[in-house]
Image (cartoon, helix red, strand yellow):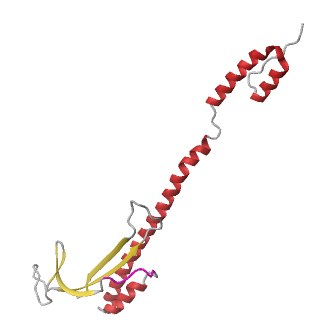
Amino acid sequence: MAASTPVPTEVSLSAMLVAERRLGSCTRTISKWAWRRLCRDLLNEEHGTAAIDLAIILPVLIAMAFGLVDYSSALLQQTQVENAAQRGLQYALARGFDSSGMSNVITRSTGSAVISATPAPSKFCGCPGNQGISSTACSDVCSDGSRAGTYVSSSAAATYVPYIALPFVPASFALQSTATARIQ
């Protein structure tokens, strides 16, 4: 009785093809089995799907990262503009109103060359109300019976240009901040 060679259940495709060449008489049966196995493996194949997923997702992630960096830079510059206006106002509160001194503090406070004191610092009289300070003559009496106060306004401005030009994003953004306080 001739010894038969058992067909293993988990065999690679190359091992099946070698077995097909050796058995000769059973070629048709092994070949059919090999093709079924090959088709099943190709339909269930998962090798390389991570690379395809990465190729699809990576450009989106990179675009999001650049957008986040760009947005963060705009927020940083807006914060610098606000801080510059507040520092100009602090200068006026400590030393009195001096337009040129306040402008110097505003432009040099953050170390950013793009921040300017626009519009120029101003001093005015006014009365506080529900919608802010209304300008009046310094000798006027306010609606609550108090005298009009002396106020100082300090403004800072800058223009932000995004790092990446996109068709749906403006080429530049105007950033501005104004700080106002009563000095008398």
82 or 118: nearer the viewer: 118
Q: Is residue 3 magenta?
A: no
Q: Quadrant of residue 160?
A: bottom left
- Residue furthest to the top in view is 1
From this view, report whether residue 103 is shown above or below residue 31: below
Q: Is residue 123 left or right of residue 95?
A: left
Q: Is residue 124 left or right of residue 3?
A: left
Q: Quadrant of residue 161?
A: bottom left
Q: Position of residue 22 (x, y in %)?
A: 85, 21
Residue range (magenta): 112-118
Quadrant location of the C terminus? bottom left
Q: Is residue 12 left or right of residue 155?
A: right
Q: Position of residue 39 (x, y in %)?
A: 65, 26
Measuring 45% from the left and 69% from the top, which residue is drawn there? 73
Q: Position of residue 11 (x, y in %)?
A: 76, 26
Measuring 68% from the left and 26% from the top, which residue is drawn there? 38
Q: Which SS type dominates the magenta stretch?
A: loop
Q: Quadrant of residue 166?
A: bottom left
From this view, report whether residue 170 is shown above or below residue 159: above
Q: Position of residue 31 (x, y in %)?
A: 74, 20
Q: Is residue 12 visible?
A: no
Q: Is residue 106 visible?
A: yes
Measuring 29% from the left and 91% from the top, which residue is drawn there? 97
Measuring 51% from the left and 59% from the top, which residue is drawn there? 65
Q: Is residue 181 left or right of residue 61?
A: left
Quadrant location of the N terminus? top right
